[in-house]
Image (tube, helix red, strand yellow):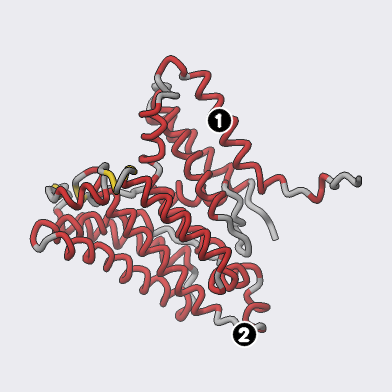
Amino acid sequence: MKLPNIKEIDLRATLIYWMFAGIFLFFAILLHDDGFLQSNNLLNILRQTATITVMAVGMTFVISAAEIDLSIGGVAGLTSVVCALMLRDYGLIQGILGGLAIGLIVGSLNGLLVSRVGIPSFLVTLGMQGVAIGFAALITNYYPIPILNDTFNTLFGSGKIGWFPGLLVWSFAAVIIGWVTLTKTTFGRRVLATGGNRDAAEFNGINTKNVKFKVMLISSVVASIAGLLYAGRLQTGRYEWGAGDELSAIAAVILGGTSLFGGSGTIIGTFFGALLVGLINNGLILAGLPVSQQQIIRGMIIILAVALAKKK
């Protein structure tokens, strides 16, 4: 039997799983006496990474289409604020719909500016991030807005949906829906074709402008869902929620095996990438490292993610 040529094996496709296993084993040994392996701590890792996982699923579609979205952290924060205000003044349904409306509005604006006007997504979403954060701070005067609606906090926070923790349900639902959409639908194939070779995609009849609009819209709506999860878990709406999450989401996507240059994407890899980011955050906190050192290590993860990005 002929053995496969090592050059034919895409090591990056499995790297995330080896990294996850290695870092998990490292912390398991190093922090054994600090409760790292306790079931509550492991469950907390899954809960704490739920928002990043949800955002990263949306980001996978954007990056697979050779675009980027830096506004998702700001969208999540603004969503939490608008949701909290509308929950207080109007009720549960209006609060949820109001939060989701933020994603629809921002995503539509991002999509139009990128796909129709032709402004690079990096610039559009960087500016939109500032707009979202600034507007959230403006309407709250920098104060947190408490959320006292128990039903909302149970559905989007630390409560349970059936037998399972709600945050895990949202996280797994995002992964499953994202995986099916990207790998089993015509839209998913069009996203990958658009990111892989836009000219070839258009030659084959794919409306790449429409694809780019939709991936930007999906990313913002998914970021709004993450904002609802922030609001439910922390039981407040605050403009700071989600700050910096765009970097963690991008790191999760690239570490998971999606090409930074578009044309390929893996939702399962993204899920493990998000878990890896959460695993490292949890381990650094249990290790008692100062916040400054934690930030340095997280920054190194971003650099590593870009270094491992697949090139065309």
Residue that sits furthest to the top in the current view: 33
Please give the name of the residue rendered at 30% of the width and 62% of the height, measured from the top-left corner: 131
Residue 267 appears left or right of 95:
right
Q: Is residue 57 above or below residue 104?
A: above
- Callout 2: SS: loop
Q: What residue sits right under mark 1 in the picture?
A: 23
Residue 126 falls in which quadrant of the image? Answer: bottom left
Q: Which mark is residue 152?
A: none
Q: Quadrant of the C terminus?
A: bottom right
Residue 254: x %, y % from top left: 56, 50
Residue 152 appears left or right of 104:
left
Q: Quadrant of the N terminus?
A: top right
Residue 17 falls in which quadrant of the image? Answer: top right
Mark 2 residue type: Gly
Q: What residue sits right under mark 2 in the picture?
A: 205
Q: Nearer the viewer, residue 221 or 77?
A: 221
Please give the name of the residue rendered at 55% of the width and 30% of the height, measured from the top-left corner: 23
Residue that sits furthest to the front in the current view: 163
Please give the name of the residue rendered at 43% of the width and 49% of the height, measured from the top-left corner: 53
Label 1 Cα crowd, 10 Å radius (few <14 / some 14-19 / many 20+): some
Mark 1 residue type: Ile
Q: How many marks?
A: 2
